Image (cartoon, helix red, strand yellow):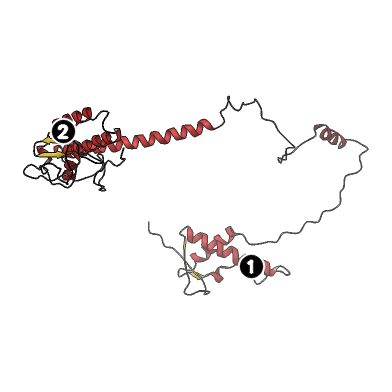
């Protein structure tokens, strides 16, 4: 059977595709005597045209000719399909199929059925316009059904993939505790209790040698400046300076620093004072200002209004 079932070779879609409804044409269309509208001869009996692709001749209201010619006129919008009775069309096609049994190839008979399906589809589109609410609802329901079918197909594919995986209890079997191969390299502390007790008892043994009392060198810590001390110093001095002061004026007294660590303590004084000023600015206690880069930083007390 011809898969396209299109006797004219046009590129229209099938009965389920999109195609504008045919236009209406007044008056019946009747082929010439002794032949069809496209020049094919009509024979008696089955009412089929001679040659390959012959189709039964139909006698309808507004048309008298072969089935393929009717389909051609309908697709070209040159015939009024509203005048054609679907009941009469189906009845005449059924009679033609009964008469063609054993005489016409089965594939050719199937082509007749497909042509009739085309005509039925074009005829039914005239009964319900495309913009009708019922038509739109039917299209939405069909789209929803297609979506569900696609989801069902995807689920079936996933189920098939899972079924091919090794199944627990069928292909593989679980055991109570997994085996541990090799040596564990996890970090952890291991204590030998017996050795620990012997070492503890050795501390109370009278014959134990005298404990090592050698002096261990410990570096003397520097007396550096703390940030808290610098914070208190900044607030105390800004209370005495209503117009504010430069950061270097808020440093501790660095003139009497002992050597050789004077440079370290001087850097500590600057660092602690600067950090304390930033902390006070974050808390809203002071305001920082600097006219240009690498210029002196000016601090002033923030006046609060309660």
Q: Position of residue 141 (x, y in %)?
A: 26, 35
Residue sitting at x 66%, y 27%: 177
Q: Nearer the viewer, residue 122 or 94?
A: 94
Q: Where residue 14 appears, x then y in whole percent?
A: 26, 41
Q: Residues within 10 Å of mark 1 (few under 14, many from 20)?
A: few
Mark 2 and mark 1 lie on one chain; the one further toward the N terminus is: 2
Q: Which residue is mark 1?
A: 267
Q: Nearer the viewer, residue 183 or 252?
A: 183
Q: Where's residue 179, x and y in %? A: 69, 31
Q: Quadrant for residue 146, please give it.
A: top left
Helix or strand or loop: what does disc 2 sit on?
Answer: helix
Per the image, label 1 sits on a secondary structure element best described as: helix
Residue 193 visible, this angle: yes
Let me know if residue 130 appears in the view: no
Give the side of residue 119 with respect to residue 187, left or right: left
**Looking at the image, which residue sits at the far right?**
207
Q: What residue is shown with label 2? A: 89
């Amino acid at each position: 059977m011809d898969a396209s079932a299109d006797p004219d070779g046009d590129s229209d879609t099938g009965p389920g595709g999109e195609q504008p409804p045919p236009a209406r044409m007044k008056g019946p269309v009747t082929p010439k005597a002794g032949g069809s509208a496209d020049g094919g001869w009509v024979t008696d009996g089955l009412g089929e045209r001679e040659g390959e692709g012959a189709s039964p001749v139909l006698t309808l209201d507004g048309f008298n000719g072969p089935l393929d010619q009717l389909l051609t006129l309908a697709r070209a919008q040159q015939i009024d399909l509203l005048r054609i009775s679907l009941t009469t069309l189906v009845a005449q096609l059924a009679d033609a199929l009964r008469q063609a049994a054993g005489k016409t190839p089965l594939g050719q008979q199937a082509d007749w059925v497909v042509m009739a399906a085309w005509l039925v589809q074009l005829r039914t589109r005239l009964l319900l316009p495309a913009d009708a609410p019922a038509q739109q609802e039917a299209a939405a329901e069909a789209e929803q059904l297609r979506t569900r079918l696609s989801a069902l197909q995807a689920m079936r594919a996933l189920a098939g993939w899972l079924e091919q995986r090794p199944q627990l209890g069928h292909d593989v079997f679980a055991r109570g505790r997994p085996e541990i191969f090799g040596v564990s390299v996890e970090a952890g502390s291991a204590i030998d209790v017996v050795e620990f007790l012997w070492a503890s008892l050795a501390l109370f043994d009278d014959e134990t040698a005298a404990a090592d009392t050698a002096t261990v060198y410990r570096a003397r810590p520097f007396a550096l400046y703390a940030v808290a001390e610098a914070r208190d110093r900044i607030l105390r001095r800004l209370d005495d300076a209503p117009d504010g002061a430069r950061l270097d004026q808020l440093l501790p007294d660095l003139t009497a620093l002992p050597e050789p660590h004077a440079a370290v303590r001087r850097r500590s004084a600057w660092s602690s004072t600067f950090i304390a000023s930033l902390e006070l600015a974050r808390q809203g206690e002071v305001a920082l200002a600097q006219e240009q880069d690498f210029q002196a930083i000016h601090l002033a007390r923030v006046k609060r209004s309660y």
